[in-house]
Amino acid sequence: MKREFIIAGNWKMNKTVEESIDFVKELDNKIEVNDRVKVLIFPPFTSIYSIRNLSDKIKIGSQNLFYEEKGAYTGEISPLMLKNLVDYVLIGHSERRGIFKELDSDINKKIKTALKYKFNPVLCIGETLEQRKEGETFERIKKQIDEDLKGLKEQEIKSIIIAYEPIWAIGTGETATPAQAQEVHGFIRELLNEKVENPEDIFILYGGSVKPENSFDLLSQKDINGALIGGASLKIDSFSAIIEISCKIAK
Ligand code: PGA
């Protein structure tokens, strides 16, 4: 089976403009990518403009976008401001949901806005530790998929990248086992099968303490089409090692 990957770094609230520029230049020098591996970075907003054209090998995305174009929304970022600067937008990250109280209804509006402005949305979903312990993982995932993608046409759903990130594995050092991750990825693929033809064309990324040591086993799973990486994307050595591993599997 042909394997293609998206390896995405989510920098969260890390790196100044200068640090971002240095990082992208160094990473560009260090990595070799083939046409089956796409490398993506979600830097802070302040760095986007300076790094957007520094490397042909690295695509840039935004960590958020608001569903209105302009107005009295202090601290929000508009699709018009991001247009022509980024190709991808991260939507519904668990930190946005948890800390900033974003609801599935907000996330649905953001996805629709992203599609309207021709961005590629990367939709994050995932269960909490309590939900997993209670055996509610699949129910939670289904609810998020149904509510976040509500009202979208088949073609629109096909242009969305999904990132499955179990919340208990984010920044904790605890990773889902490859089998645990594959089980949920397979389930997401089944859910998508009810909404689109050829759900195998949709990229489903795994996120949650991905590092060089566990990336080979995770990326070797049949329904894992890449990784969304927080902590390990902040260091050149670990991020480039994961990219290298994905290129080997993608060959
Ligand atoms: P982590 O973060 O790799 O540091 O666990 C992943 C994410 O939040 O996207």
Image: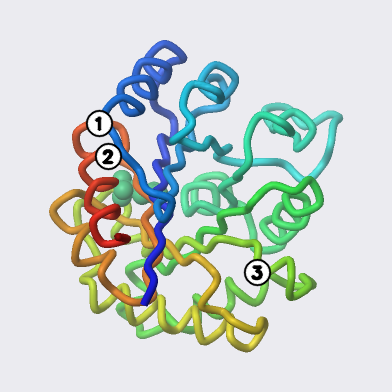
Q: Give the residue at x 67% y 57%.
A: 107
Instruction: Estimate the spatial distance between the alpha carbons at disc 1 and disc 2, rounded to whole Å.
Output: 6 Å
SS at mark 3 in the image? helix
- Residue 66: name its quadrant: top right
Looking at the rendered image, the quarter that the N terminus falls into is bottom left
Q: Which residue is mark 1?
A: 235
Label 2, residues with CA under 10 Å away: few <14, some 14-19, many ≥20: many
The colour mode here is rainbow
SS at mark 1 in the image? loop
Q: Give the residue at x 57% y 26%.
A: 45
SS at mark 2 in the image? helix
Q: Which residue is mark 2?
A: 239
Side of 250 where 114 appears, left or right: right
Percent position of residue 193, x then y: 58, 86
Instruction: Estimate the spatial distance between the alpha carbons at disc 2 and disc 3, rounded to whole Å.
Output: 27 Å
Percent position of residue 22, x then y: 36, 15
Please identify the residue farthest to the left as the structure is shown: 213
Is label 2 within 8 A of ligand 1 (CB to nearest ligand atom)? Answer: no
- Residue 178: name its quadrant: bottom left
Label 1, residues with CA under 10 Å away: few <14, some 14-19, many ≥20: few
